[in-house]
Amino acid sequence: MKNTIIQGDCIDIMKTIPDNNIDLTVTSPPYDNLRDYNGYTFDFEGIAKELFRVTKDGGVVVWVVADQTSKFCESLSSFKQAIYFVEECGFNLLDTMIYHKSNYAPAYPTLRRYANTFEYMFVFSKGKPSTFNPIQQEKVLKNYKNKKSYFRQKDGSQILKVIDCDRETKDAENVWVVCPTKSKDAQNHPAVFPEQLAKDHILSWSNEGDTVLDPMCGSGTTLKMAKLLDRNYIGIDISEEYCDIARNRVNTGKDLFTESI
């Protein structure tokens, strides 16, 4: 099943994947009713349970999601889903990351709120994560070797510790600023996942030769990046139209990333 894109209901397809088989999942589900994906809907609870079953011990699921705003209230779907992953499925919430859009739509004046500039990237792990390759800033900001930092204790006091990181760059933070530019090879999909996000998550939570899953692969960004980064991939989408877009991007994509990353 590796290195393939399958049309069908992702729960049914995932049931054919053996237990503890997937190293990393990077996906972005439909956000409430913010987009019309050819009229398709999805069973969140069923997907979450299957993701836990197919994920290896030490594997990671990256769930990129946002909330709909209606009648001056956010839906809270993102938080409800995160809690379900942990309390009902058994995942650990390793990190709540932020995808900050450097190019975002202005707020409607009638909403009486500030412009929405970010989405959540929940990083779930099945037990202790077995892989972490931290993205580092390319520019050397300062000498990071033998860095001294203060750590606050429960009683409010602070202890000075020296962190020997043996490098000269700082790790990237858990807020990633990315321009949500649509790739030229995915213009016919309503919500294309930014290549930069997929690339950095795949680099962070997997190694070459690992298997990366996207059970709602849409235009195939996660799969394209997995292939370019020498990972195996499995893509699933209920829409044959979107599967065709994804296959075209994966099979005919250039050896260079199409976005400026």
Image: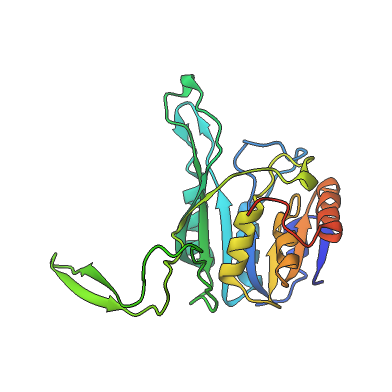
User: To which quarter of the image does residue 220 belong?
Assistant: bottom right
Q: Give left or right: position of 144 versus 224.
A: left
Q: Report x, y in % for residue 131.
A: 55, 77
Q: Of 69 and 140, which appears nearest the observer?
A: 140
Q: Is residue 27 visible?
A: no
Q: Quadrant of the N terminus?
A: bottom right
User: To which quarter of the image does residue 31 belong?
Assistant: top right
Q: Of 164 and 4, which appears nearest the observer?
A: 164
Q: Quadrant of the C terminus?
A: bottom right
Q: Report x, y in % for residue 69.
A: 51, 33
Q: Give left or right: position of 260 versus 170.
A: right
Coloration mode: rainbow
Q: Of 216 and 185, which appears nearest the observer?
A: 185
Residue 212 vertical position relative to residue 71 in the rendered view, above or below:
below
Residue drawn 52% across the image and 28% down it = 106
Residue drawn 38% across the image and 78% down it = 165
Q: Give left or right: position of 104 versus 227.
A: left
Q: Give left or right: position of 252 versus 108.
A: right
Residue 79 vertical position relative to residue 233 in the rendered view, above or below:
above
Q: Report x, y in % for residue 37.
A: 73, 40
